[in-house]
Image (tube, rainbow, N blue to C red):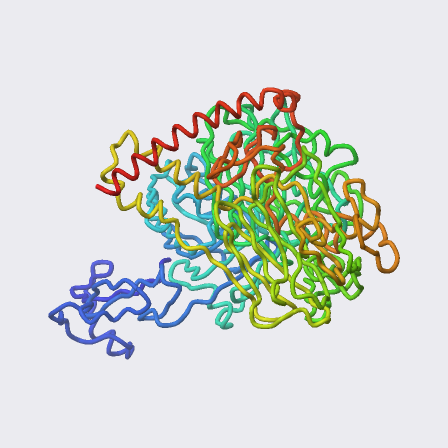
């Protein structure tokens, strides 16, 4: 029964051969909405656009009809918002019919939104037969199953369940509209604008049911395959004109059972907390041979950790991990390992819930979606993922990290919460279904009990939220201690002048695109150098923090000219303790003293590139590519502080000695004053220099701060260059290779993943130093000739 009332005119009604006066019958019954006449109004009823909220208007008999199916609204003109139910995988709505229902025609529609590729949307179920009309998500598509299980006498059964599919990639957390129309043997499925039609085989056309169920199928007696539970939102469920979600909410029917929640709720299903990085569990092997749909949610404060790993035959494996706050999806189908990095606007270790969906279809297209940002990559070659052994969740056993494939960065487990885990439509209970468990794993997700407050860290220290508590990053404060309120390692430089020098080992000299420098000081001198960092001899790159005329500033050169940024408003040689902070990113720089206003420097545009863009149409095609690459390379060279060799503190080597107190010096992860106090062999102390107080503890050693090492890497991009150099005007040549925005080294690993730090330098790379002088000379000669040719060509074209 479709529950559609008839609208129109009737005359000459005969029943069993006898004429019936329908007008007289209607008047006797005083039926509402019935008139003793037949008049068709002129004009179009939809001309006035009566349907609201993008409802579709259709012409009826002397009326308009608003189709509100795709709108999320209902009523005559689609003005009332339809109710929404939220499902977390354990929730359902079940409408129990007061009597057994038999239908040969159905009109069904609903709207849904989900991030999972599998889940039951709606199904009719029977207590006495396998009859069903079922809608479910199956691999990101909507699957319609119609089964008319004829068990009655003198009934010709159909051939079995009929299925149709429509739509694709519907697990995108967007609203989708589903319609089903069946008239006897003919049936049609529409998902948004995708239509699929079918014709049933057999004479049986009657559907029997006792219930209409959503979210979870509870009537399972005659069902051979139970569909996965639904996680997401449902709206506007209409079955033969009955809007059941709203009827249940408003109490208009008394045969409705539900524990799903009304309204759009944040859905976090079955959360589990891994309380330490050594906690993990294992499940049965992930079944993902031909295709794969994975989904989970996580919340953490740790930037790194293994989330999922399953090995297989040969080199096949799959890994999902968190690396420096970003999702990495690593896999091998037999063609060699591949890495897909998730896109996100910021690091994800922010103690907020995030969604991860990973799919692999039959065409070997891999999609990694993190929250609302997707990365898609197609892989050629082998298409099947042959996994064996346990699926590890949140970590591995002792000794297993060393055997992980090269592109897998993790060396510890995941600490935090996992929820809503969906493994190809299977929703495991991580605790009850675990084959093995190790460490502290608890149901639920409480999160950190101690959180960062405005006053958690003193002296402008940065509070870093961790899972059980928080830590203070004191690196840019000149202070130390758990809350950045203890004095840093302090030296007094006397009148005679003193110098503390740190020398990088020749094969560890860094080249940086960003720098961070902090030191606390007090002095009465008008002139002196506090700190100076120099590149290897012959390069000329440097960075110098100095006082001139009582004003503090930084001068640096990473190209062809000196760049200065200064605190010019107030002298600092007042004998008071000040903290100066300097940051550099390429040619951009900031300088701040104490909590005073920040001084900034931004370089002007590259005039050579601007002129090239103006003149590019005049440059012959065969020269345009090398000209553009040369100019881009030139621009890159002006952002890198190359091959840093020494850090000199005190200024006496430059005849501008500093006199006073220096404390808590920090430069790109190095605490040079700590290292000096501990007797580091790479440090020399000369002249009038005296340590104040005790030698700092090991906890405050050279490369440590209150911030964990993995967090420090977020602030600085440093690449060891093995003493190579970058060609600049009036400077030596280079053997460095640049790929995109990354700095390469002649001795670094062949991997193209800049995030992977643990790799071994090959012997070939190490032994190549012997050939460097000859190669450098040849490269210098070739580059000089090439550069002169390009400059001549550009100058000629621009001037013409």
Q: Check the image and report above or below for 21 versus 667.
A: below
Q: Nearer the viewer, residue 531 or 383?
A: 531
Picture quadrant of residue 7: bottom left
Q: Which is nearer the eye, 216 or 758?
A: 758
Q: Position of residue 664 (x, y in %)?
A: 75, 58
Residue found 35% across the figure and 38% down from its top = 628
Instruction: Indicate the quadrant containing the N terminus: top left, top right, bottom left or bottom right.
Output: bottom left
Q: Report if residue 152 is visible in the image.
A: no
**677 left or right of 299?**
right
The residue at the point 83 percent across, 51 percent down is 677
Is the residue 523 above or below the residue 431 in the image?
below
Percent position of residue 161, x then y = 45, 38
Nearer the observer, 138 or 295: 295
Q: How far across and down, in percent of the image, does residue 390 sit?
A: 70, 33
Look at the image and tell me in which quarter the C terminus lies.
top left
Q: Position of residue 574 (x, y in %)?
A: 69, 72
Q: Nearer the viewer, residue 429 or 639?
A: 639
Residue shown at 86%/53% (left/top)? 697
Q: Is 534 left or right of 577, judged from the image as shown?
A: left
Q: Quadrant of residue 576?
A: bottom right
Residue 113 against residue 645 in the figure, above or below:
below
Residue at the extreme left of the image, as rendered: 42
Question: Extreme right residue here?
Answer: 694
Q: Is residue 421 visible?
A: yes
Using residue 559 as the reference point, say whether residue 412 is left or right of it: right
């Amino acid at each position: 029964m479709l529950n559609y009332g008839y609208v129109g005119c009737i005359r000459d009604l005969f029943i069993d051969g006898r004429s019936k006066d329908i007008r007289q019958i209607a008047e006797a019954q005083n039926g509402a909405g019935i008139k003793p006449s037949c008049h068709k109004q002129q004009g179009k009823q939809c001309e006035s656009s009566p349907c609201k909220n993008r409802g579709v208007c259709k012409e009826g008999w002397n009326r308009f009809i608003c189709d509100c199916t795709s709108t999320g609204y209902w009523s005559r003109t689609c003005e009332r918002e339809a109710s929404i139910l939220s499902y977390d995988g354990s929730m359902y709505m079940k409408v129990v019919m007061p009597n057994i229902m038999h239908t040969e025609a159905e009109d069904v529609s609903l709207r849904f939104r989900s991030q999972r590729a599998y889940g039951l949307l709606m199904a009719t179920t029977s207590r006495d037969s396998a009859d069903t009309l079922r809608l479910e998500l199956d691999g990101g598509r909507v699957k319609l199953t119609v089964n008319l299980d004829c068990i009655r006498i003198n009934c010709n059964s159909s051939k079995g369940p009929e299925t149709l599919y429509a739509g694709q990639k519907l697990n995108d957390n967007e609203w989708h509209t589903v319609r089903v129309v069946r008239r006897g043997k003919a049936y049609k499925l529409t998902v948004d604008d995708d239509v699929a039609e079918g014709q049933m085989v057999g004479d049986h056309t009657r559907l029997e049911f006792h219930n209409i169920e959503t979210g979870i199928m509870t009537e399972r007696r005659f069902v051979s395959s139970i569909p996965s539970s639904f996680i997401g939102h449902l709206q506007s469920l209409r079955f033969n004109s009955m809007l059941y979600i709203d009827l249940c909410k408003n109490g208009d029917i008394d045969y409705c059972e539900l524990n799903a929640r009304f309204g759009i709720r944040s859905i976090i299903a079955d959360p589990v907390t891994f309380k330490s990085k050594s906690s993990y569990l294992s499940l049965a092997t992930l079944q993902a041979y031909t295709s794969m749909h994975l989904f989970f949610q996580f919340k953490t404060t740790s930037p790194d950790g293994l989330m999922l790993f399953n090995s297989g035959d040969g080199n096949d494996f799959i890994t999902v991990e968190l690396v420096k706050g970003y999702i990495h999806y690593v896999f091998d189908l037999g063609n060699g390992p591949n890495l897909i990095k998730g896109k996100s606007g910021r690091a994800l270790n922010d103690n907020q819930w995030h969604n991860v969906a990973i799919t692999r279809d039959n065409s070997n297209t891999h999609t990694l979606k993190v929250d609302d940002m997707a990365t898609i990559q197609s892989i050629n070659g082998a298409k099947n993922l042959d996994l064996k052994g346990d699926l590890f969740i949140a970590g591995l056993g002792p000794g297993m990290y060393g055997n992980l494939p090269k592109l897998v960065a993790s060396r510890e487990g995941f600490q935090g919460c996992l929820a809503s885990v969906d493994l190809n439509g299977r929703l495991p209970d991580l605790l009850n279904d675990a084959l093995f468990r190790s460490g502290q794993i608890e149901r639920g997700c409480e999160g950190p009990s101690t959180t960062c407050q405005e006053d958690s860290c003193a002296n402008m220290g940065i509070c870093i939220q961790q899972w059980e508590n928080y830590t203070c990053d004191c690196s840019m404060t000149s202070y130390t201690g758990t809350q950045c309120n203890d004095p840093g390692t302090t030296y007094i430089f006397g009148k005679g002048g003193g110098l503390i020098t740190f020398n990088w080992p020749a094969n560890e000299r860094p080249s940086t695109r960003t720098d961070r420098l902090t030191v606390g000081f007090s002095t009465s001198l008008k002139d002196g150098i506090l700190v100076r960092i120099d590149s290897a001899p012959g390069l000329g790159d440097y960075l110098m923090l100095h006082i001139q005329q009582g004003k503090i500033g930084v001068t640096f050169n990473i190209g062809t000219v000196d760049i200065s940024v200064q605190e010019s408003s107030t002298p600092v040689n007042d004998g008071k303790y000040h903290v100066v902070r300097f940051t550099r990113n390429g040619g951009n720089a900031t300088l701040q003293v104490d909590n005073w206003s920040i001084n900034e420097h931004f370089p002007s545009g590259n005039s050579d590139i601007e002129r090239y863009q103006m003149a590019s149409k005049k440059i012959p095609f065969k020269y345009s590519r090398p000209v553009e690459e040369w100019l881009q390379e030139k621009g890159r060279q002006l952002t890198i502080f190359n091959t840093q060799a020494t850090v000199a503190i005190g200024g006496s080597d430059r005849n501008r000695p500093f006199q006073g107190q220096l404390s808590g010096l920090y430069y790109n992860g190095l605490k040079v004053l700590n290292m000096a106090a501990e007797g580091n062999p790479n440090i020399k102390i000369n002249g009038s220099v005296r340590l104040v107080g005790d030698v700092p503890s090991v906890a405050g050693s050279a490369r440590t701060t209150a911030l964990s090492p993995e967090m420090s890497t977020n602030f600085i991009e440093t690449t060891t260059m093995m003493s190579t150099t970058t060609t600049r005007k009036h400077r030596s040549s280079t053997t460095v290779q640049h790929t995109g925005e990354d700095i390469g080294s002649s001795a670094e690993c062949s991997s193209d993943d800049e995030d992977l730090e643990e790799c071994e330098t090959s012997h070939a790379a190490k032994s190549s130093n012997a050939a460097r002088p000859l190669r450098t000379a040849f490269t210098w000669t070739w580059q000089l000739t090439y550069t002169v040719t390009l400059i001549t060509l550009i100058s000629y074209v621009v001037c013409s």
